[in-house]
Amino acid sequence: MSEFQFPSSIRSRPIYGKFEARAGKDCLMIADAEGAEAILNMVQKSDDSQEMMANTHIIFIPKHTEETYVEKLKALGARQFYLGVSYEASVPRLRHILTNAHMGLQVYLAGTEGVMGQAQREAIEAGIPHVAIQMEHRGSVARRMQCVHCKGITEDVITDPFICSHCGLNLFVRDHYSRRLAAFQGVRVDAEDHGNVPDQVELYK
Amino acid sequence: MSGGKNKINVKVVEISKVNDLVTRFSFERIDGALFPTFSGGAHIVIEMKDGEINRLNPYSLMSDPMDQSLYSISVRRDDNGRGGSLFMHRKVKLNDEMVISYPVNLFAMDLRASKHLMIAGGIGITPFLAQIKQLGTLQGHFELHYSCRSRALGSYVEDLTDHYPNNVRVYFDDQKQTIDLVNLLKGQPLGTHVYVCGPKGMIEWVRNTAFEMGWPHEAVHHEEFLAPPSGVAFTVNLATSQKTIDVGEQQSLLEAIEAAGIDAPYLCRGGACGQCETRVLECDGDIQHNDHWLDDEQKVGKTHIMPCVSRFAGRNLVLDR
């Protein structure tokens, strides 16, 4: 199962829903890894999927799922389908789409929090209100973390605490999230008592 | 208590006929101080002492939001209305002293928008006049589509087309010109917000079309002042103040509450802002809900009422006021 029920937390922590096909001029779907399942699920359930696909651009970043979903996604018959080797490699295309898009564009983001958050930030900067962007979490619960001390970003953090990949401090994984940075905040865990670092545990285990 | 209750004593310094239906009024402060600045889309509430009746009507400010020396409004004469606009047109004279509220904005521009698409119908042009002046200072990007009955009744058409020939397009009903709304909305770049002010039908048309085309709710703004409808007189019991009041045919419930000397909250006086929402304690009869604030559950359940525009018919109504 690629779905995960996040426990309730502070208000800052993003919560994700289930895709709901909405009317719109054009459609942009971005997914990484198991996020493909959210797209497949919505499109297969939709009554007028052909009409929707005729105006849809899909960006898919397979990561470890490799070929698992590629053919299935292609078979949906989107107007454009782009296979990205990484999120970073897809950014120029994403920005190009948003620059030329019109109001009425529907944005669907699926997969890990890191990719959804970064794509959401691009869409917000392009002028879509954040609440109008649909997101459905699938797959890994790893997080994109910002070190509040050195401001460096560490991707795919799966343990708490973790070591900042930039300054080497031991950081506590907070639920405090920034849409602007598309990252959760990591705060030094042994600030009061240097060296007193709790054992690492995997997130949500 | 409510935000719009800070009052300013003013003097009428300009009464100009704009066309057969619309007259512009300008005010200066009597104390010689400066008016507060406001943001485009704001309105003021004007107190009108019309014989026995004390009217409080909202009007959008149309002057430059940064000009603190003068406030201007435009009033369209409504011969079938409750009399507020007729009072302004017929009884108000130059140098009269009047009382107005501080400005309140329920139709502000979202300044995060990269483009402001404005759609106006008739006298609905007034808030846009202030917004356009504000955007001039901010160097904001706007486009105005303005629909009016005829050239003769098109308020400020020449001003707008002279000053902003590339931003303004006017449509005259008598020449069968209509806004091509679907194509207009289809071509708007991402980051555009749409604003509509005009008759009820126009507001619904723009909002519904935009939503059907996938526009986010947060990017679609509207302003519609409802005039309190007149109706059959009725009686209301006010539990907190322990008073029984009569609401006249031409009076709104809110006006009757105020006439009884009770300090009730309000802001827009037009069923939009939610400020005057009042709990219903007992109701034996029907509430005529005329607002667009309460949700259906509150309306059907008769749990709340908006005294600024809604009325009652029946045996007994007790309010928590």
Image (spheres, coloured by chain):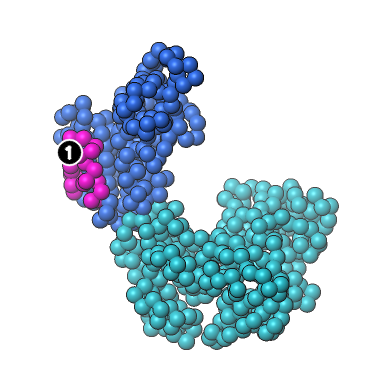
- Residue under the image location 49 percent in, 19 percent down: A192
Q: Is residue B232 visible?
A: no
**Which SS class for mark 1?**
strand
User: Magenta stretch containing residue B48, yes or no?
Assistant: no
| Chain letter for the part of the structure drawn in blue | A
Observer-nearest of A188 and A159: A188
Quadrant of the image for the N terminus of chain B? bottom right
Q: Position of residue B224 (x, y in %)?
A: 54, 65
Q: Colour of chain B?
A: cyan
> At label 1, which amino acid type do we have?
Leu
- Residue under the image location 63 percent in, 58 percent down: B289
Q: Is residue B160 above or below residue B210?
A: below
User: Magenta stretch containing residue A81, yes or no?
Assistant: yes
Observer-nearest of B247 and A87: A87
Q: Is residue A57 above or below residue B157?
A: above
Observer-nearest of B271 and A118: A118
Q: Label 1, on which residue?
A: A83
- Residue under the image location 63 percent in, 69 percent down: B34
Q: Which residues are magenta?
A: A75-97
